[in-house]
Each structure stands twice: as structure tokens, then as C-alpha cells.
Image: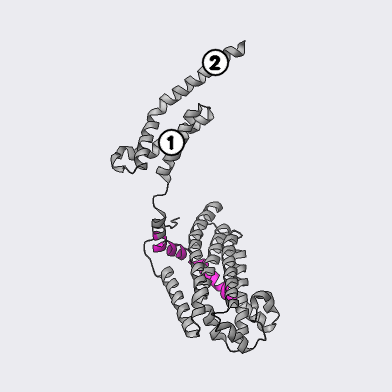
Amino acid sequence: MNATVTTPSAIESAALRSDRFRLEREADWKRLETIVSRMEKGRLRGISDEDLLALPGLYRTVASSLSIARETSLDAATLAYLESLVQRAWFVVYGPRSSLWEWLRGYLGGGWSVAVRAIWLDILIALAVMVAGAAVGWILVSHDPEWYFSLVGREMAGQRVPGASAEVLRGTLFGQSRQDGMSVFAAQLFSNNAQVSILAFALGFAFGVPSLLLLVQNLASLGAMAWVYHQVGLTLDFAGWIAVHGTTELFAILLAGASGLHIGRAFAFPGDRPVLQAASEAGRRAALVMTGVVLMLVVAALLEGFARQLVDETFGRFAIGGFMLTMWSAYFFAFRGDSSGGTDRS
């Protein structure tokens, strides 16, 4: 008997509480909804300066109302209305202010180069490690050719092995435009370098050590292969063959390794900031660099798949590679542009 009496009373009490809650705050809700609706429709001129200044405060007020409504288990209609309004207001207050095209224009127009210059110390360290890696590969194979297959691998090496004649090795550098074997090797090389770039960045959280080790391993294989061609007097031709795409691809690997190292250094040496804050700031900056690294790898793949096959003489290959290296260097270290797009200002 008591249950049949208390249940309607509880329902009436909840309804009264919900109505009182709505009446006390509904004016702010309606005002925010009006402002948001006008902004969604692009009718900014119809919004007064007073409403624009009040927008952030109204958003926080309605968000607080939603939190209270959830805790006090108000009616479902009120909850649904507040959730929708808060979501719409969030996009108006905090949502992106530019289109993808505008962001890309700002990123390529200066944002990317600013992010690269911000990690200049890491780039210098990564460059030194890459040079050392190539030297290590050269020295190891020159003392014991068996090291070659540990560094390069038999599948990728193909005919490029210690002891191969000059004619065989020359044939791997020139006159390959119509042969599938060259395309397969180019695809393997690109795939390997793309994996190295991604891993060098992704493993940077371990104080940058794996990133540096990957750079050493990757460049050691290049140094080992360079020694094989050097033994038969084809060093310059091999360098030209690499230069076509390598000035772009190796530059991309350098930036990827530097990005990973940048994050690792933030973990190891956060300075006066908390570790997580330092790592977060470094991660955002490195992510901007890595976005461009993907673009560089695509450009390198096009150069590797087309330019290197079509240009079948060393001077032309050096010309292409030198032009690309000059272009990248000028963009990153000389071009300033508009640094407002896509940069991290922390």
C-alpha cells in the first residue's frame, strides 16, 4: 500500500525538481542556442559584441548544467537537449577555424620549415650518426666481406655482391629502364627506407636510442654496398645512381630519426617542465615534421620509379639529386614564409 502512494510522489518530486532546474537556467541555454545557431549559419553580423564576449562563459555555464543534470538524474529530454547544445557549442568555441586547404597552405607555406628548424640540434646529431653508420658499414665489409650479407641481405643484394665483376655491377646501374628486376629492387629499397623512417620516429620515446640505432643500421647497409662498387671503380656512378632519389629519401630518413630523437631528448632532459608536458610539446613538433616526411618519401618514390630509370647517365643523375637537395635545404633553412600555419608555438 505504501509503495503505491510513494511512487507517484517520487515521480512528482523528480518532475518538480527538473522543472525548477530548467527554469533557473533556461535563459542562458536559450541565449547560447541562439548564438550557436547564428554562427552555424554564418550569420556573424547578426551577433552583438556583447553576445560574442559572453559566448565562452555561456558555454561553461551550460556544460556545468549538463554535469549537474547527469549527477541528479534529471529527465531524459533535458539531458538530450543539453548534450546536443554543449556539443554544438564546443565546435563553435574550440573547433577548427580553417579548412584543410587553408591548413595545408599554411603548413607548406612555412609551418613545416619552422618545425624542422626547431629540431636543428637533433638533425645535426642524427646526421653525424648516419655518416658514422655509413663509415661503419664500409669498414666492416672492407675487412671481412662476409659482413656484407649481414648488413644488406642476400635477397636485396642480388648481383650486387663482393667479388662481382665491373661489367655485372655496371649493368645494375645502367640500361635497366625496361627490366623488371630494377623496379623490384627499387620497390624493396623504398619499402625498407619507409619502414626505417616510421620506426625511427615511433621508437623515439625510448630516449631516442632505437632511433639512432636504426639510422646506423640503415646507413651501414648503404656504406657496405658503396664499398662493393668502389672495389671495381664505380664509386661515382653508384653515388649518382643513389643521388637521384637518395637526396630526398635520405633527407626524409634524417628528419624522421631527428624527430624520434627530439621526443627521446624531451623524456630524458625535460628541463624545468614536467616530463609529460615536455614530451607532449616535443611530440607535437615532431609530428609536424613527420607529416612532411611522408610527402618526401612519396616524392622519393616517384624519383626512384621514373627519373632514375629515364636518366641513364651519371651527370644527369647528379644534376637531379643536387637540385632536389638544394631545394629541400633552401626550403627548410632559408625559406621563412608564413610560419602561422600548422606550427607548434610551445
Q: Secondary structure at mark 2?
A: helix
Q: Nearer the viewer, residue 190 or 55?
A: 190
Q: Quadrant of residue 151?
A: bottom right
Residue 153 numbered mark, or none: none
Residue 8 numbered mark, or none: 2
Q: Which residues are magenta?
A: 105-133
Q: State whether residue 243 appears in this view.
A: no
**Alpha-carbon span between mark 2 and mark 1:** 31 Å
Sequence-wise, which precedes: disc 2 or disc 1?
2
| Residue for point 42% across, 46% down | 95
* Quadrant of the snapshot with the C terminus: bottom left
Q: Residue furthest top?
A: 1
| Residue for point 52% across, 31% down | 70
Let me know if residue 211 is in the magenta part. Answer: no
Let me know if residue 127 is in the magenta part. Answer: yes
Q: Secondary structure at mark 1?
A: helix
Residue 168 in the image: above or below residue 195: below
